[in-house]
Amino acid sequence: MSVATEDPPWARRLLVTLAILLGIAIFLAPLAAIFTEALRRGLAPALEAIAEPDALAAMRLTLLVAAIAVPVNAIGGVAASWAIAKFDFAGKRLLVTLIELPFAVSPVISGLVYVLIFGAQGWFGGWLREHDIQIIFALPGLVLATTFVTFPFVARTLLPLMQEQGREEEEAAATLGAGGLQTFFRVTLPNVKWALLGGILLCNARAMGEFGAVAVVSGHIRGATNTMPLHVEILYNEYMFVGAFAVASLLALLGLVTLGAKALLEYWTARPMGVEA
Amino acid sequence: MSATTALRSGSARRALPGLGLSLGVTLSWLGLIVLIPLAALVIKPWSLGLAGVTAVLMDDRVQAAFRLSFGAALLAAIISLPLGLLFAWVITRYRFPGRRLLDALVDLPFALPTAVAGLALTALFANNGWLGGPLAEAFGWQIAYRPVGVLIALIFVALPFMIRSVEPVLRDLTLEGEEAAATLGATRAQTLRRVVLPALAPALITGFGLGFGRAVGEYGSVIFIAGNMPMSTEIAPLLIVVKLEQYDDAGAAAVGLAMLVLAFVILLALNVLQRRLRRGRA
Amino acid sequence: MTVEIEAVTRDFGTAATPALRGVSMTLRQGEFVALLGPSGSGKTTLLRILAGLDFPDAGRVLIGGRDVAQVPARARNVGVVFQNYALFRHLTVFENVAFGLRVRPRAKRPDNAEIARRVQELLALVQIPELESRYPEQISGGQRQRVALARALAIEPQLLLLDEPFGALDALVRKEVRRWVRGLHDRLGITSILVTHDQEEAMEMADRVAVMEEGRIVQFDAPHSLLDAPASAFVASFVGDANRLTGSVNGGRLGIEGLGAFDADGLPDGRTDVFVRPDEVRVVPPREGLTPGIVEWSRQADRGRWKILVAVSEHRLEGYAEQPIERGAPCAVELQAMTVFGAQGERVSLSGRLAANSAMPGV
């Protein structure tokens, strides 16, 4: 850095100090608060809260919901990125905008839209009741709302990379006799595997931590339709603070592990991935 | 024309296979998960009729919730401007111990589930919390369960968008421009104001839009610290939940649709502003 | 394998003129042909159509006598060396070359031992057997080019397409690699098409050169014919070095401002483009009866030959002298031959006899 573009030392010190203090207050303190509150009465009560049957049921449900929503969005995201990056067709820009749309929608609305379709007063509400099919206040509703909220993650990490890589390698594969699936699995996929993994990790973290959207469609039935974040809310509302913060700690750990994995992937591939959601 | 002559235009044919399949998957996925449900949101409110929708939106409680949600989100985005600039500047331009940790911490609000963030902020800013306690004691400020609590939560949510929008631009901004300004006799302050800030303006607007968009719909981070008193600390997304609990689906949809439309209008205005800035430079 | 291209047209709809406007050409078995033209002249589009990576709006392409309109790229058996090589970055050199064999349908796929044998043979052929376990990013540009060539040859192509394959190489390596590729072609006898904008490359490597301009082939000929008998002013200016002048014909006499008048039977009256190769411009000390000029610079070209830039009234002419002439010194020029294109594109070559006798001061 040249002298001309250097800020005076007092300014640097002031700005750095300010940033560190604010960083601690805004970002570090909330994180520390979660673990501190969870361990307020020691480790044992926290562990008990996590091992409690309702908490375990919430964890199982969270895993199940993510296990369906994430693959759906991974497949959709890969298909969309392939189509947009490797071909020219009318309406491409509109398609990209529509794929990003769920990020611009409030999580509560993401849940609401499914209530409007499948709820008691919804478009298919009567039909579903006649056939005794439960979507809202049941697993399908949780999966749908979660899928909506985490919709763009994979496409968003893959698309810029695929566009940057262009079509030349795929074209070379075609001239060498490879078919569509061979080209995809032997050329395209290996080139984007780390970005795909990153996208899946981010998608998964959001899927497991989603609150607003699932709150609307869950119905809060303990042991049945409560995911981990909803379980946290219930415990908190019942003044079971240690339990609430203990389960919240698990979710916070999930977030930290995801951030760490993302940093590692970015380091390996020397390429930023972006986590904005 | 012989039978073997290409009858279709060359552009209608593709060298790489797989467009049909991938586009088919994409459109089904997009249509089933996003477009059809959003269509329901657009259609449902009108079962109340225009007068009914107007009545829902003109309701005092709804108006108060909208004022809080949009006001606090805009304010949070505005406060994020200098804060985001500070963090991005310090992270990209200076070397100091703990820089990498600070850089990583900034992503935390992205990765922390919203309910967890909400709980954490409430614990921090409650009257007996680490930050709320001293503030209450020293200044008599009450933060949790007040509109200012909503604002704090929304800043937490919006700030990382600002930082991560500005940071790459700041990093790519070569020092040459600043050096050139210095050789032309500009003071450091003039250089920052005339060279650096204009270059960052589009990114600042992007960060503002992203942060605002996220904040205005935010639910989990807010409801724990907000207190949720109608007419005072009740946010618009919560109102949707309340209406659903009262089996007022159409009313909930009307609130949801109004939120979306209002947010899009604001984001569109930002987009136009950004385009003006870009064109002005070109 | 023969290649016949018949009236191929391609319009992307993005530019003012179509990329290809009725291109026809026929390649003989085993021939090495260059497509030469400036960027945007349509040569890469034609190459992509041959490879099956793009498709004509009209016209047809026959490879080995078969219409390939309905044959997709992967079934054409056409080897392509891409401009930036398009090597698979996640595969080793060995696996890059083996790719075309591994993706064959099971019935036609060689076993692993056979693949290994074939790949090693090819890597030996392109003289990089030691690189088989490296990744593309770990080898040099010249080596990448050899890998791309080996990969294209692995499918035993009936036609080999080379898209500006030497562009990414530095000048020193380029010349050597050019000769080596041409030698390889002569050994293997695969019909080959080279796309290039470098006229020296085209002239040195190809049996015949197709010069392209704005989506058309303006001349398809042996290299020496392009030099001796350029079909148009564009070809004359694009191929080989030439001094370009303008003149006008009046009653069978061609006048060039400051250089005199020449007999030009067969050219109609009107404006003309005149090309004079530097080799045909003799620069001598001032002499009665020759056009006078002033030396702008001179440098030794070979033993006993000096390249000279002469200012003759408004013109700057490059020519050769058999002795050094100082900068700023007066001299005389003698034009020994010139190619003239009339207003309607008629070409007349004037030989030395005509040029020498007609210097007319004051015209």
Image (cartoon, rainbow, N blue to C red):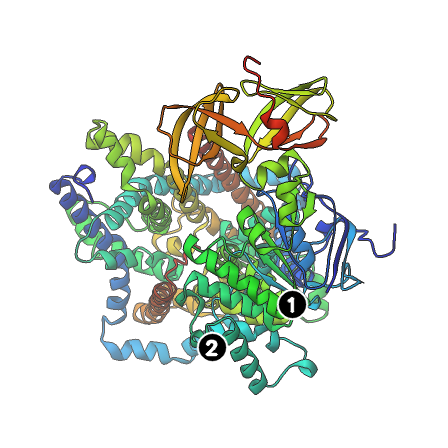
Image height check: is A162 above or below B173?
Answer: below
Question: What residue sits 62% from the left and 47% below the top?
Answer: C224
Question: What residue sits 24% from the left and 36% below the top?
Answer: B179
On screen, residue A241 versus residue C63, left or right, reads: left
Question: What residue sits 61% from the left and 66% below the top?
Answer: C186
In the picture of the structure, the residue carrying the numbered disc 2 is: A60
Image height check: is A231 above or below B62?
Answer: below
Q: Quadrant of the N terminus of chain C?
A: bottom right
On the image, the x and y values in percent for residue C159 come to 67, 64
> Residue C189 has which mark?
1
Please report, as a chain letter, where disc 1 is located: C
Residue flagged by tag 1: what amino acid is it? Gly
Label 2, label 1: how far apart the Cα atoms are? 66 Å
The residue nearer to you, when weighing A65 against B100, is B100
On the image, the x and y values in percent for residue C52 come to 69, 59
Q: Is residue B155 visible?
A: yes
Q: Are marks 2 and 1 on the same chain?
A: no
Mark 2 closeness class: few <14, some 14–19, many ≥20 residues within 10 Å? some
